[in-house]
């Protein structure tokens, strides 16, 4: 049975047992999963977090020659500012600007007008229509408007049914976009496959990382079709022509592989992020075996090993205790890379946790008796509490979410624009660590100037004070 029959993708809490709240030692979680179900937890107090709308926009703003219509109130357009640096649509955005009357009576007239105007102004190849909480409540008939205007304007129009509240895990927004694109833009018909073509799914990786992974695949004779980051309509249409699919970060984009496997029987290989020498070797070997290219892969891996053995000084520097704040699979992969470089990861913060991650949690539990584990998107007050107790020598994050570390004088590495994948990723991170630890004066200066942000009463509480098990 096709999983594309419903109007919208299922939320991650149902599909993957996703948790967005946890703090403490990781011991309890494997026991819960062994009993059949991770216990959902809620925060009785929470700082603001990203909704599925922002995660969805994070995907579609990078698609080439696309325009975006946000069907909601004018305040929803503020989300545009979050994506200025990634916006490959070059500002081809519109907002339907719904008012109080529209939120009650419906607003298909404004939606129709906005789609026509953005088509006239920019002539895009694709128009994405994002719904918002207002539309989810008033139940506007977006589908009818889209069907009508597709024929009239002769352009691909894709409704993306985000609502901002259906799931507590904003990363569901990625799934919603994949679901909409596969359902709306790829007709369910049999097609001949292109030999050696592989769909490479990328959502949040920087261009250097995408190039590094593409090069790894090319080394074993595969041709890459990139999706959704920096994809064109042509890339999207080629999705059904590939022989295989794989993700750089399976947490973010494995659902695209699941959808294509279900609809077009394209095998999806679910492999961990190739960060670190060991993980990269495993990644290449598994893909080579899966695609029948073991001999090519073994020759290339041998030459890479020789290069690394000739420069051992690159990896030698004093051991540090490290706190890692990254998305789950990336956090686990970077933690293993840090251990490979001789450092000790003493704490981990991830925005969400899924049942599939418990294997990695088990590994941590076996090797570390005292380990701080925090699950939550944002929640800086909890993170600062943990950091003050741990006092790590180094902090690794992504995208600017490291204010608590700087306030406490902890050297920070932001990997937003640093490639940590492939064999070169090991060298890149090692070099960055050496540079960061050799000059702490800037972060020490900021820590000395920074006033205490949270009251002592907050910081004396346990980090899990506001996290309670959900009662049904």
Image: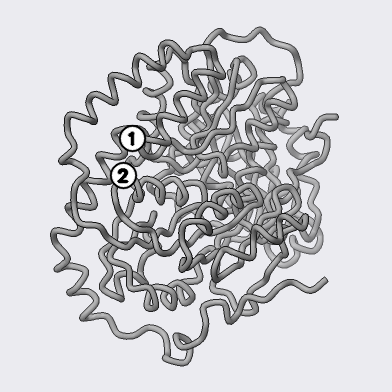
The circle on residue 236 is none
Give x and y (percent) for residue 41. Answer: 68, 69
Res 50 → quadrant: bottom right
The quarter of the rendered structure image containing the C terminus is bottom right
- According to the picture, the residue beneath numbered tag 2 turns out to be 418
Q: Residue at x 66, y 61 (%)?
A: 168
Q: Residue at x 67, y 24 (%)?
A: 154
Q: Helix, strand or loop at disc 1?
A: helix
Q: Residues within 10 Å of mark 2 (few under 14, many from 20)?
A: some
Q: Residue furthest bottom?
A: 457
Q: Residue at x 29, y 85 (%)?
A: 451
Give x and y (percent) for residue 439. Answer: 14, 61
- According to the picture, the residue beneath numbered tag 1 turns out to be 208
- 329 displayed left or right of 143: left
**Which of pointers 1 and 2 lies earlier in the amino acid sequence?**
1
Query: How many numbered badges does the structure rendering display?
Result: 2
* Residue 98 higher or lower than 239, as above or below: below
Q: Nearer the viewer, residue 82 or 101?
A: 82
Res 187 → quadrant: top right
What whole-number distance in Å separates the C-alpha atoms at marks 1 and 2? 8 Å
Q: Nearer the viewer, residue 410 or 391?
A: 391
Give x and y (percent) for residue 202. Answer: 49, 35
Q: Are marks 1 and 2 in contact (CB under 8 Å)?
A: yes
């Amino acid at each position: 049975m096709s999983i594309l029959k419903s109007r919208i993708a299922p939320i991650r809490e149902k599909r993957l047992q996703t948790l967005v709240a946890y703090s403490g030692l990781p011991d309890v979680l494997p026991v819960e999963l062994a009993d059949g179900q991770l216990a959902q937890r809620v925060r009785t107090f929470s700082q603001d977090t990203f909704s599925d709308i922002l995660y969805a926009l994070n995907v579609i703003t990078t698609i080439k020659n696309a325009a975006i219509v946000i069907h909601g109130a004018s305040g929803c357009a503020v989300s545009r500012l979050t994506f200025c640096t990634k916006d490959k649509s070059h500002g081809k955005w519109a907002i339907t600007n719904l008012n109080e009357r529209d939120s009650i009576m419906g607003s298909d007239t404004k939606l129709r007008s906005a789609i026509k105007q953005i088509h006239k102004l920019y002539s895009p190849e694709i128009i994405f229509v994002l719904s918002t909480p207002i539309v989810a409540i008033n139940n506007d008939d977006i589908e009818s408007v889209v069907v009508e205007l597709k024929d009239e304007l002769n352009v691909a129009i894709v409704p993306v049914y985000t609502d901002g509240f259906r799931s507590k895990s904003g990363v569901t927004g990625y799934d919603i976009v994949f679901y909409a694109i596969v359902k709306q833009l790829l007709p369910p018909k049999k097609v001949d496959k292109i030999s050696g073509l592989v769909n490479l799914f990328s959502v949040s990786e920087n261009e250097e990382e995408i190039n590094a992974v593409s090069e790894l695949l090319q080394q074993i004779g595969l041709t890459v079709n990139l999706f959704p980051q920096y994809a064109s309509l042509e890339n999207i249409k080629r999705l059904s022509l590939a022989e295989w699919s794989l993700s750089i970060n399976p947490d973010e984009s494995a659902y695209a592989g699941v959808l294509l496997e279900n609809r077009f029987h394209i095998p999806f290989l679910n492999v961990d992020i190739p960060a670190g020498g060991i993980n990269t070797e495993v990644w290449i070997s598994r893909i080579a075996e899966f695609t029948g290219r073991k001999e090519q892969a073994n020759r290339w891996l041998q030459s890479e090993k020789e290069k690394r053995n000739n420069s051992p000084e690159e990896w030698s520097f004093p051991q540090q205790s490290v706190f890692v704040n990254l998305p789950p699979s990336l956090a686990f992969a970077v933690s293993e890379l840090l251990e490979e470089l001789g450092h000790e990861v003493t704490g981990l913060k991830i925005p969400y946790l899924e049942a599939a991650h418990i294997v990695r949690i088990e590994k941590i539990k076996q090797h570390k008796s005292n380990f701080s584990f925090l699950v939550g998107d944002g929640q800086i007050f909890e993170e600062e509490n943990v950091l003050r107790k741990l006092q790590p020598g180094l902090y690794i994050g992504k995208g600017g979410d490291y204010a608590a570390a700087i306030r406490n004088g902890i050297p920070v590495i932001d990997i937003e624009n640093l490639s940590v994948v492939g064999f070169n990723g090991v060298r890149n991170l090692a070099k960055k660590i050496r540079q960061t630890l050799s000059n702490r004066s800037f972060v020490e200066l900021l820590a000395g100037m920074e006033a205490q942000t949270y009251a002592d009463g907050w910081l004396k509480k346990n980090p899990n004070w506001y996290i309670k098990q959900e009662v049904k």
